[in-house]
Amino acid sequence: MSDSKPWLKSYPEGIPEFIGKLSYASVAEMLEKACKKHKDRTAYVNFGVGITYGQLDEMSKNLAAYLQSKFNKGDAIAIMLPNLLQYPIAVFGILRAGMIVTNTNPLYTPRELKHQLNDSSAKAIIVIENYACTLAEVIDETPVEQVITTQIGDLLGLKGSFMNFMIKKVKKMVPAFSIDNTVTFNQVLDKGKSLTFSNTPTTLDDIAFLQYTGGTTGVSKGAMLTNNNMVSNVEQVRTWNQDNLKDGKEIVITALPLYHIFALNANCLLFTEYGAKNILITNPRDMPGFVKEMGKHKFTAMTGVNTLFNGLLNTPGFDQINFENFRLALGGGMAVQKNTADRWKEVTGLTLLEAYGLTETSPAACINPPNMKDYNGMIGLPIPSTECKIIDDDGNTLPTGERGELCIKGPQVMKGYLNRPEATAETIVDGWLLTGDVAVMNDEGYFKIVDRKKDMILVSGFNVYPNEIEDAVCLHGNIIEAAAIGIPDEKSGEVVKLFIVVEVDMTVDAVKDHCREHLTGYKVPRHVEFRDELPKSNVGKILRKDLRD
């Protein structure tokens, strides 16, 4: 065993160092074979209505045939959908047509949507009517030639027709929009039945997804994720869970939006490989409704971010759910806080595993072992076929225990940023992806994220890391959420400002007293601001940049 890979000695028994040769030449092939293998099993459930893998296979083939009649191999097709049955059909159909999926956030502003459609050269977009008004504002300034619209209930039968009427006519949840020459999702599926579908050969080197980063450091960039990247990452995570998850036995709760890279690969692709029943939660912000839906299923797995898990723990009725079949709770996207993890274990009986990845790594890079007994504050071990190292500002590899920038190498590392060779060259150096995250590795090969480099606060020459402050703050039972940023200070350069959401009223002095119990003096927040809620991304990640702004 190489000393350069100390994590291997911490691998669970039977987990190999490498994943070996891939079984599929593309994501489309992987999905097609999964649909045929599990054709009679329920694939997705939404609002109580399910479709089988056989139906998913047929509908995605019809969509593919329609797209092939209009566009060419390699064209980008955008999706602007929440978690609905239409989403997996759209993804599978686009990939089977030999085209590229580019996911957009339904909550995009017109400016953000226009940028992505132009940057990706999207030829078509599948959009939920509720947000088509955003598209209408910019459609004439984009390369989009075909708009496919859909309503929330379109695949839900009679129940869906009633839902659509209520949403549109009674609740007035669909703002007026005007877009020329639209076609509906159901019309497309119907037309596709009479068209010829041809299997378009794609290779592992072909781009499958143009997945856009959040743009936190400037303009949003399209990460080119190839078939090799995505299939490799599915295989890496499957190998990591080989003793924990079983074919045809999984029921997964999908509350994170499938258009986000975490849920896209973990919930949409990986669990399709398992032939899982996927429970789609369209509006997880409705926590009581979310908990009620969870109670209907003997689920085995769930992915989420800290704020989602925390929200569930604070929702009445969650502790009454039957967790007897629950085997995998995976947290990513942001740091899992100790207080949340401890409460999660207490309520569900299951350890909340923290994982780490990026859009640029398809996304999984490090995951804690599935057999881990308790929360450890780490992001885990590099998964099979993945290497990690810590470097200093000059690019030198640092020894165990030293803080520096985390770098990742493996088959899941993106091809690069679309049309941005300079940004690609700055991010991928000699095959290593520079993450921009400050991390440390211990003797057992476990990695811990200290923070984003740009989020670091410099107080009188001392580095202060927001994650550490937030974790300590949330140990207080009355504090629900916290975010720390640096603000200018004449004496010390910067000081810590804390934003918190509390369960019951607290004083600033009480908050500071609590912080002094757990933090060195210079880390104690100088300023405390109470908020009703903190700004969050589409997957619930707290946005410190918005607080700084």
Image: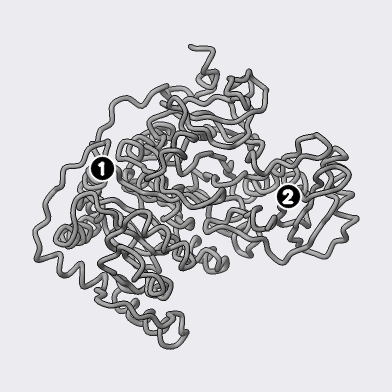
Image quarter (top left, top right, bottom left or bottom right) of the C terminus: bottom right
Spot occupied by residue 326 in the image (x, y as percentages of width and height): 50, 47
SS under mark 1? helix
> From the viewer's perspective, is 21 left or right of 375?
left
Res 46 quadrant in image: bottom left
**From what the image shows, is residue 455 above or below residue 184?**
above
**Residue 434 % position (x, y):** 52, 33
- Which of the two marks, 2 or 1, is nearer to us in this view? 2
Q: Residue at x 77, y 48 (%)?
A: 473
| Residue 300, visible in the rendered structure | no
As drawn, 131 above or below 407:
below
**Toward the viewer: 321 or 470?**
470
The circle drawn on residue 30 is: 1
Q: Which mark is residue 485?
A: 2
Please tell me which residue is depicted at 55% across the width and 18% down the height of the picture: 6
Whether residues under marks 2 and 1 lie with C-beta atoms below 8 angstroms apart, the answer is no
Foreground: 341 or 392?
392
Please name the amino acid that badge 2 sits on: Ile
